[in-house]
Amino acid sequence: MSNPTFDQAFQLLSVVREADKTLEGLQALYATGLLSDLLKTEDPAKVDREAFRKLLGFDPSSFRVKMGAAETTDEIVAYLNANGFNYVNEWINQKNFPLKAKETPEDDEIVIYDPGTSFTEEEGLAILKREGLLRPTYEHGLRFAREHGTATTSAKKPFVIFLHEPWQDPDGDRRIVYVNRYPDNRGLDLYYPVNGFYGDCVLAGVRPRK
């Protein structure tokens, strides 16, 4: 049985409320107090969806990031270093990967896709296109690390690859941003896409805005 969507879960909880009954399987929600918050709200969009997704057993594959937020790359790096990241590449800074704040930041949805095998840069871009996903920018990678870098975890598929237009390092090599989400070795680093990617890598794509 596949995981229910959040809206399906909300409908289930609505039925429970209307029947004035509780289900044993919802005890975890009661214990956290989240269920009470959900049942009281008139707007489901205002509740912490990620918290419910985790408690309902979801393996998150999509994440929202705020594009054009106020934080600079240097501020993001400082945050990561102080909040659970073991390593951030010294070349990832505001000079090399500049971020500009927008008057009105916009949400983008980043989708994590597992090709299930090793792949080249060209194959990765073809996979994103096939799946209806847009090529990410390095900003997507930086914002993802800042907003979700410690919330998503995988020991089998730790490397989240952002196939943006590569940055050329001082040695003249093409480099791209990737996030290491291994539980005990989180990092934000740069990789040489010319080397290809192994089966422990997953792709980050961007869902087109409606």
Image: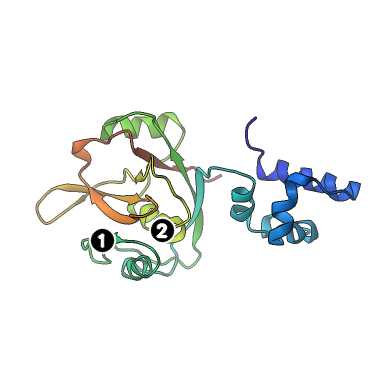
**Amino acid type of disc 1?**
Ile
Q: Badge 2 local density, few (<14 within 10 Å), some, or many (20+)?
A: many
Q: Which mark is residue 92?
A: 1
Residue at 50% in and 50% down: 63
The percent coordinates of residue 158 (x first, y second) are 37, 45
Q: State the residue lying farthest toward the left.
A: 171
Depicted 93 relative to depicted 22: above or below: below
Horizontal side, residue 159 vs residue 190: left or right? right
Please determine whether, in this image, residue 159 is positioned above or below residue 98.
Answer: above
**Rounded to the nearest whole Å, what is the CA distance between mark 2 and mark 1?**
13 Å
Task: Tell me which label, 2 or 1, sits earlier in the chain.
Answer: 1
Residue 105 picture location, percent across and down: 49, 62
Q: Residue at x 36, y 55 (%)?
A: 184
Q: Which mark is residue 143?
A: 2
Q: In this view of the protein, can residue 67 be seen by the observer?
A: no
Under tag 2, what secondary structure? helix
Q: Quadrant of residue 198?
A: top left
Name of the residue lying farthest toward the right: 19
